[in-house]
Image (cartoon, helix red, strand yellow):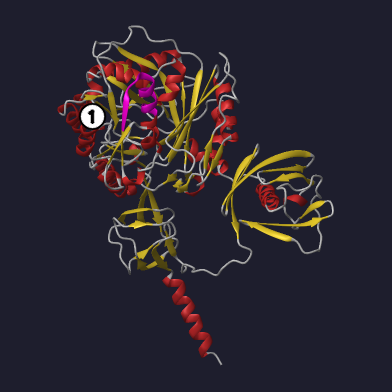
Amino acid sequence: MIESLLVANRGEIACRVFRTCRARGIATVAVHSDADAGALHVREADAAVRLPGAVPADTYLRGDLIVKAALAAGADAVHPGYGFLSENAEFARAVLDAGLVWVGPPPGAIEAMASKTRAKELMAAAGVPLLAPVDPATATGADLPLLLKAAAGGGGRGMRIVRELADVEEELKAASAEAASAFGDGEVFAEPYVERGRHVEVQILADAHGTVWALGTRDCSLQRRHQKVIEESPAPGLPDELRAVLREAAVAAARAVGYRGAGTVEFLISPQGRPYFLEMNTRLQVEHPVTEEVFGLDLVALQLAVAEGAALPAELPAARGHAVEARLYAEDPAAGWAPQTGRLHALDVPGPELFPVAAAAPRLRVDTGYSDGDTIGVHYDALLAKVIVWAPTRAEALRALRHALRRARVHGPGTNRELLVRSLGHPDVTEGRFDTGFYERHLDALTTPVPGERYAAVAAALADAAARTTGGTLPARLGGWRNVGAPAQRKTYGEHEVRYRATRDGFVVEADEGDEADDGDEVQVIAAAPHRVSLEIGGVVRHFEVRAYGDEVHVDSATGAYRLIARPRFSETGHRAPPGSLLAPMPGTVVRLAPGLAEGTRVTAGQPLIWLEAMKMEHRVTAPASGTLTVLHAVPGRQVEVGALLAVVTDTDAQDAQDAQDAQEESSP
């Protein structure tokens, strides 16, 4: 029996495993980097061991240090979570060699599936349907488009779609470099890329007594950069015959490698309904909660039971209802999914009071590794929380999840919350017509600015005024929008300047010509307090919840959430970067430069020049224009802050033309 368990991971998955351990009476041990010293998973554990350093290579990827930590803390078992060392056969062997219980599959099974190329050979022998591999060196136009994939690891790292033969060599090098950086293995293979395919997977669970469960299906097609965003179970719209094929193939895959514990077999479904094996993840998946909710299971508890030698019941539990999970990331989808960092002031998703406890009522669950006041750093994944809803039907689950996200308070760095809300309400999603290319086609429409920001700025200004008013409340029945010439108080948030002045009846807010107030909606200020403002807009009263954290102000309403930055009335003149500057879009690490890049190199507009890594994702910094690289500060391995000057591209042709024109004008009489 396991008495004390160390989780060789961090954040949300560590907290998730600890929750089950507490329910089963198992003591918990956390490991943490210096950057995670105050993290939620450390605070929740019974004991914690420091892994000196901050970057994963020095901390969570050091299997030797983690085994020593388990022994030092008196743990008798290790759970790997997901990511980091969760699919590392050598780490699993080191845990077992140290006399500890490994809560995962046998090292041999991990090894067999660690290389996607080797895994495909095994699956072919087991009769699992596969895509035929393509040799990149001999690929022709008929083979396009190609999908390049890292043989080791996952999560979209080392993956590229190639649509032009001329790009194969460059993309192959880029994929290999990214794979080597992420997994220590630069092997990359190629296979046909299935346009408009769906990503469907089967959760498996196997014991040491010959029983293998195939726990339904999950659809994970809604992805950005080959990383999942929204998942659901069961996968919608699949014929019963196809579901049976997927379950049988998943069981065959597990038996082929003598699997034990929880794992996932992933498939690509073509538009014609043909399934193809993608890979087998020999660990618990991020999206496991949707399967738990549909089957009424605790997969972590079952992992622990299997590790202790227990047998699974011969019959699977019955599936019921539908579950959907949305991954709330600290990122900016409109800026290339750039990760966001900083202090998380508040994270609150409406709970049971929104969904009363009843057999047929939607049920909400939030899995997170953060709490109010925590800092989102640059070293790790940008996942803030997983928000999961179960309901009797798919339509009810989508609606309830959308409502919960809309009403959530997420104060701090920018997130993908609005993208999630819009995605869950998109007709292609609600009607089950989506595929892995959904965000490529719809990203622009899903990331247009939330309307009504001007009203949010007014609410922020009035809340600020109320906070500075005796009693903390502005008088009711305030004046509406009107143009007046008297001096007014001013408050600026981003591009919105709000002007208001005190009158005998309260406050009057002035309208700028052409702003939203003059677009046909009459606006009346109903009430204002430091944290709540009510405006009547076009005859409808809207309520705004306002929270200020220094100059950062968050305004939440039923129609949208807004993050505003208060600007000083008189802006200071600061340093401006020279034209053609390449600035770091986020804090991160320079991982590599374009081959041969140096000062004096000629570059073309849009050419990738510098690669940054932040929160387990690579981001390309491209040339803003054609010209000559005149400044290069980026060095591989160097940490940079957001806005740091990486390089400068000078448009030499334009400069030469300007110099010639200036010389001609000077010589003219």
Q: Residue at label 1?
A: 74
Start-end of magenta stretch: 16-29
Q: Residues within 10 Å of mark 1 (few under 14, many from 20)?
A: some
Work out whether residue 515 or residue 498 is closer to the camera in this orientation and state it.
Answer: 498
Secondary element at tag 1? loop
Q: Residue at x 59, y 26 (%)?
A: 399
Query: How far from the left and from the top, in percent, is residue 108?
Result: 19, 25
Q: Quadrant of residue 314?
A: top left
Asked which quadrant contains residue 25, the reply is: top left
Give the percent coordinates (x, y) of residue 132.
29, 29
From the top left corner, tell me how far across and down residue 145 is, in percent: 37, 39
Q: Is residue 343 visible?
A: yes
Viewer-proximal residue, 357 or 497? 357
Q: Nearer the viewer, residue 431 or 86?
A: 86
**Quadrant location of the N terminus?**
top left
Find out whether residue 134 is within the magenta segment: no
Hey, which quadrant is residue 116 in on the image?
A: top left
Q: Was residue 21 drawn as part of the magenta stretch in this picture?
A: yes
The answer to whether residue 253 is left or right of residue 199 is left
Residue 203 shows up from this direction: no
Residue 111 is situated, as x and y percent measured from the top left of the image, at 20, 29
Q: Among all residues in the image, which is located at the extreme left?
A: 97
Q: Is residue 641 above or below residue 240?
A: below
